[in-house]
Image (cartoon, rainbow, N blue to C red):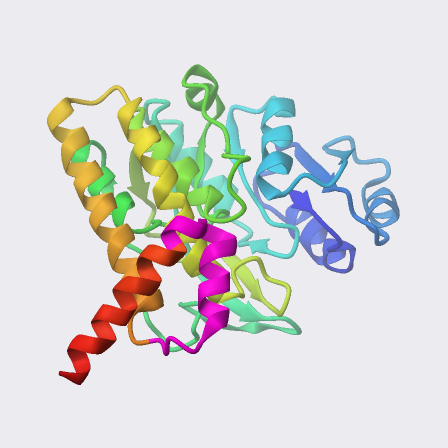
């Protein structure tokens, strides 16, 4: 559990873990330089329960905090959980039972729901609260799954359960050079190195994501830039993956196409007087890309007028 100034949520999160049907777990809470009462809250709520350990690090970001947790983990399986989110009471029990019958490259994942802070009993299937079911139901590995993950992420961070041995053997960690989309990059790395995805379709196995103004996923503008930046790093991941050249070519082509399309969505049609967009492009993607897409937008607007 990475935590940064989320002490106010920890009582609910820790109580939720203690209520799990499956009880043979360890919880590693990594405090990413919090300035609130996180340390005191953890001590008060976990004192006398050796399954909980607390580790403080200087503020380094979500990816670094999760990597610290991975380096400390001793269990057979890994479950990520953000400090403000919850698990259904049977999630760990059902998933460990399924994974015990599978090879260690299997990643089991479940449905998730969203709930508004202060109203946990009212749940939504999607982030936008419009009733859409966005999660793909995959039971496969190989190129088919790689192509799915190049398009978009397949699950929220707390949905999967997977073998610790698999990621240790393949030296898989979160990309600390990214500020956003780090879980998407992590899962793609897993699949490129041989992991298969297995959707557990069970009504009692799920994860619950809290919606509030400090959610990591709350700023859609940040998400758009995050995807574009992440896509600029994905080619290196593909090129070093132990997969056939033909598969690499397909993945690289699709990733390049989707990065271009995301930039179009972000830039095209915006007034050239909107200097804020140019400044955002320059700040997040660099001067050369900002100038390139500013000029392409001017050309796009010119063609629309003619």
Q: Position of residue 282 (x, y in %)?
A: 47, 56
Q: Residue furthest top?
A: 169
Indicate whether 246 appears above or below 1: above
Residue drawn where x is 14% and y is 23% of the image: 245
Viewer-closest of 182 and 262: 262
From which residue to which does the magenta span run? 270-289
Q: Position of residue 94 (x, y in %)?
A: 44, 42
Q: Quadrant of the N terminus?
A: top right
The image quarter in which residue 294 lies: bottom left
Residue drawn where x is 58% and y is 46% of the image: 81
Q: Quadrant of the C terminus?
A: bottom left
Residue drawn where x is 30% and y is 76% of the image: 269
Can the viewer see residue 133? no
Left or right position of 112 against 192: right
Viewer-closest of 92 and 283: 283
Viewer-closest of 245 and 304: 304
Left or right position of 46 against 113: right
Viewer-closest of 124 and 257: 257
Q: How many marks?
A: 0
Indicate whether 217 appears above or below 167: below
Residue drawn where x is 21% and y is 37% of the image: 252
Can the viewer see residue 171? yes
């Amino acid at each position: 559990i990475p935590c940064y100034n989320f002490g106010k949520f920890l009582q609910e999160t820790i109580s939720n873990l203690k209520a799990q049907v499956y009880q043979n777990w360890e919880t590693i809470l990594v405090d990413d330089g919090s300035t609130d009462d996180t340390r005191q809250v953890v001590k008060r709520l976990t004192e006398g329960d050796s399954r909980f350990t607390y580790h403080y690090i200087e503020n380094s970001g979500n990816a670094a905090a999760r990597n610290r947790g991975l380096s400390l983990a001793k269990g057979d399986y890994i479950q990520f959980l953000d400090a403000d989110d919850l698990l259904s009471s049977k999630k760990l029990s059902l998933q460990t039972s399924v994974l015990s019958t599978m090879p260690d490259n299997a990643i089991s994942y479940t449905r998730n729901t969203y709930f508004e802070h202060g109203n946990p009993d009212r749940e939504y299937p999607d982030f936008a609260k419009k009733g859409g079911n966005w999660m793909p139901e995959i039971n496969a590995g190989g190129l088919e799954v790689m192509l799915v993950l190049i398009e978009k992420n397949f699950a929220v961070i707390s949905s999967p359960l997977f073998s610790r041995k698999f990621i240790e053997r393949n030296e898989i960690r979160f990309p600390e050079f990214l500020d956003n989309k780090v879980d998407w990059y992590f899962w793609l790395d897993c699949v490129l190195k041989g992991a298969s995805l297995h959707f557990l379709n069970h009504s009692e196995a799920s994860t619950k994501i809290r919606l509030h103004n400090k959610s990591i996923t709350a700023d859609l503008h940040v998400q758009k830039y995050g995807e574009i930046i992440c896509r600029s790093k994905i080619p290196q991941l593909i090129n070093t993956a132990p997969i056939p050249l033909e598969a690499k070519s397909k993945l690289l082509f699709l990733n390049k196409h989707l990065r271009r399309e995301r930039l179009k969505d972000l830039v095209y049609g915006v007034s050239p007087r909107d200097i804020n967009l140019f400044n955002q492009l320059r700040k997040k993607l660099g001067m050369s890309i900002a100038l390139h897409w500013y000029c392409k937008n001017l050309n796009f607007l010119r063609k629309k007028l003619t």
